[in-house]
């Protein structure tokens, strides 16, 4: 992570905003040589906040742990078998359309 002084950050604020938002890099800002704050993109902040929300939900985290244990123990079901058992039929046309949209988003 790059660090710069608060004085330099003030001088280059608009450039820093553009750089951080475009690259996702973080910039530490120091005051009197001591790191005080970090400039991060809105996207990174949203991601960090979502992660904190998930990790602070004890029931959800326990469910994820149990799911991981099930996977490791081989207690899984094939999606195609589950659809058959539940009588779910997704037309091929819909599946292909979703795949195309998914690939375009990348």
Image (cartoon, rainbow, N blue to C red):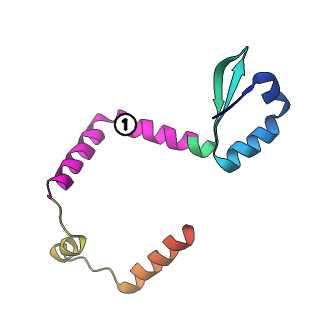
Q: Residue 83 versus residue 71: which sits nearer the camera?
A: 71
Quadrant housing residue 93: bottom left
Q: Which residues are magenta?
A: 45-74
Q: Is residue 47 left or right of residue 15?
A: left
The location of residue 73, given as percent across then percent down, is 14, 53
The location of residue 43, given as percent across then percent down, is 59, 46
Residue visible at 18% across and 66% down in the picture: 77
In the rendered image, the quadrant that contains the C terminus is bottom right
Q: Dot 1: within a 10 Å radius of its alpha carbon, few (fewer than 14), some, or many (20 or more) residues?
A: few
Q: Is residue 94 left or right of residue 37?
A: left
The location of residue 62, given as percent across then percent down, is 24, 40
Q: Tell me if residue 8 comes above or below residue 93 in the rendering.
A: above
Quadrant housing residue 83: bottom left
Q: How many marks?
A: 1
- Confirm whether the magenta stretch covers residue 80: no
Which residue is tagged 1? 55
Residue visible at 62% across and 42% down in the picture: 42
Residue visible at 64% across and 37% down in the picture: 26
Prevalent SS, magenta region: helix
Q: Is residue 78 left or right of residue 43?
A: left
Secondary structure beneath disc 1?
Answer: helix
- Confirm whether the magenta stretch covers residue 49: yes
Residue visible at 64% across and 25% down in the picture: 37
In the rendered image, the quadrant that contains the N terminus is top right
The location of residue 32, given as percent across then percent down, is 73, 13
Outermost residue toward the top? Answer: 32
């Amino acid at each position: 992570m790059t660090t710069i002084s608060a004085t330099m950050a003030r001088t280059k604020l608009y450039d820093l905003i553009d750089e951080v938002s475009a690259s996702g890099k973080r910039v530490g800002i120091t005051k009197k040589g001591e790191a005080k704050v970090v400039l991060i993109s809105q996207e990174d902040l949203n991601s960090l906040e979502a992660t904190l929300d998930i990790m602070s939900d004890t029931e959800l985290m326990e469910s994820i742990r149990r799911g991981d244990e099930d996977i490791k123990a081989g207690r899984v079901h094939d999606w195609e078998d589950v659809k058959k058992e539940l009588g779910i039929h997704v037309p091929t046309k819909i599946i292909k359309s979703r795949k195309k949209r998914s690939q375009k988003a990348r």
